[in-house]
Amino acid sequence: MSVDQEASALFYSMIKRCLTKEVAPFYDQWEASGEIPRSLWHALGAAGLLGIDLDEQNGGSEADIAITQLVLEELSRQGFGGLASAYNIHANIVMPYVQTLGTASQREQWLPAMARGEILGAIAMTEPHAGSDLASMNTRAKRTNEGWELSGSKIFITNGQFADVVIVCAKTDPSAGAKGVSLFLVDTHLSGFARGKPIKKIGQHASDTAELSFDHIQLPHDALLGEEGAGFRYLMQELPRERLGVGAQALGAVEGALALTLAYVEQRQAFGQRVADFQNTRFVLADIKAQLDVARAYFEHCLEKYRQRTMSSTDAAILKLQLSELQCRAVDRCLQLFGGYGYTEEYPISRFYRDARVQTIYAGSSEIMKEVIARSLLGKVDSSSR
């Protein structure tokens, strides 16, 4: 990535050491239990891997954003897709939201503890009957003398089962459509907050996913994150970073799947020769490598635009669409080269396959990405979907 090579090498060494010691020996167990232990977040915090590019006074290291993306990439490359998604939400989305939009007291209250891994974050946008269509959101926040009263529910919330703080999107002006959306920092220990049973998923089993409900939760005035009614604008403002994270996950996963496949086809025999010696195998692998390198070039292009604060929501949509779709295609083609073994739990490629599928759905589905791109071409303002 385009970042100081010495700093990058130092962080990469730290990342690999941490994953080798703290994650690799236990990850199968976490996949089976469907949760990541709190001790792992403490270990990531102790290693300086949470809030890497945040301000030092907030517990960060003030490193380049590329280092945070490097963590996501390496997690995915090693086949820890569920942890990568959980990390993306906590360290690449929630913490930057708080640093960018929060008051000094909000940053002081939440960020240092999040950087230490003592507090886990989540963000709640999707509802049972409203996904990317924010205009259809039913969660409401009403002003009271003491602050706000929050009611509603959210679904498919990553880190939802164990989060200590959740950024909740709610309507504060139901008559204003998407312009009536505001963001709130919700302490999950408050009365009226409830979590449903863990949602069982096709893949990313280690990453917990929950339905959350808010039953007339009484929030203080300072629970409002940013300005009232500016929630949709903030979501659009932060989308490039969120989708950079998904892109980093995709790059890492494709590289990891490709490495597994190369090792397998070079030793697997069929019809008296290595599977690697068949022309079809060589063409499939060459095609994946070519697409991967092109995808990485666009990712680097977007990363530099993000640094310059010129990365648009359309750039982010193109990145997310192309890289997540590439991940699904590439991992599928890699698994095919394993034959029947690819369909077994014994071979890690099967987990790469399961974990890939959600990448074209969360953080804005491929269909929504195409709509965003089309609207930018046709000059139509996107005012209600993300």
Image (cartoon, rainbow, N blue to C red):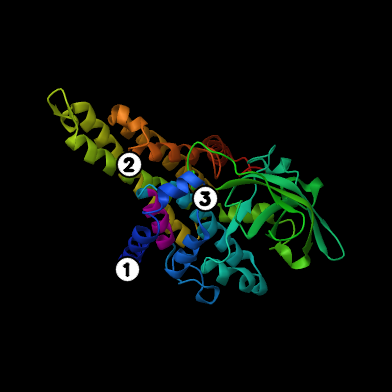
> Disc 2 designates what residue?
257
Question: Please, what secondary structure does the residue beneath circle 1 have?
Answer: helix
Question: Please, what secondary structure does the residue beneath circle 2 have?
Answer: helix
Residue shown at 53%/36% (left/top)? 370
| Quadrant of the rendering where the N terminus is positioned | bottom left
Residue shown at 32%/38% (left/top)? 347
User: Is 150 on the left or on the right of 195, as rendered?
Assistant: right
Q: Which residue extends farthest bottom?
A: 57
Closer to the chain start, of discs 3 and 1, is: 1
- Whether residue 173 is visible: yes
Task: Specify the label residue 234 is tagged with.
Answer: none
| Above or below, comparing residue 8 to residue 214 in the picture | below
Indicate the position of residue 201 as horizontal and vertical percent values.
53, 38
| Quadrant of the rendering where the C terminus is positioned | top right
Residue shown at 56%/63% (left/top)? 95
Task: Specify the label residue 35 is tagged with.
Answer: 3
User: Of residues 160 and 182, which is closer to you in this image?
Assistant: 160
| Above or below, comparing residue 251 to residue 338 in the picture | below
Q: CA distance from mark 1 to mark 2?
A: 25 Å
Mark 3 packing: few (<14 Cα in 10 Å), some, or many (20+)? many
Q: Which residues are magenta?
A: 66-76
- Can residue 277 be found in the magenta stretch? no
- Whether residue 311 is visible: no
Residue type at mark 1 is: Leu
Task: Specify the label residue 10 is tagged with.
Answer: 1
Q: Quadrant of residue 356?
A: top left
> How many badges with numbers are in the image?
3
Indicate the position of residue 383 as horizontal and vertical percent values.
67, 45
Mark 2 packing: few (<14 Cα in 10 Å), some, or many (20+)? many
Residue shown at 30%/65% (left/top)? 9
Indicate the position of residue 363 as horizontal and vertical percent values.
55, 45
Question: Please, what secondary structure does the residue beneath circle 3 have?
Answer: loop
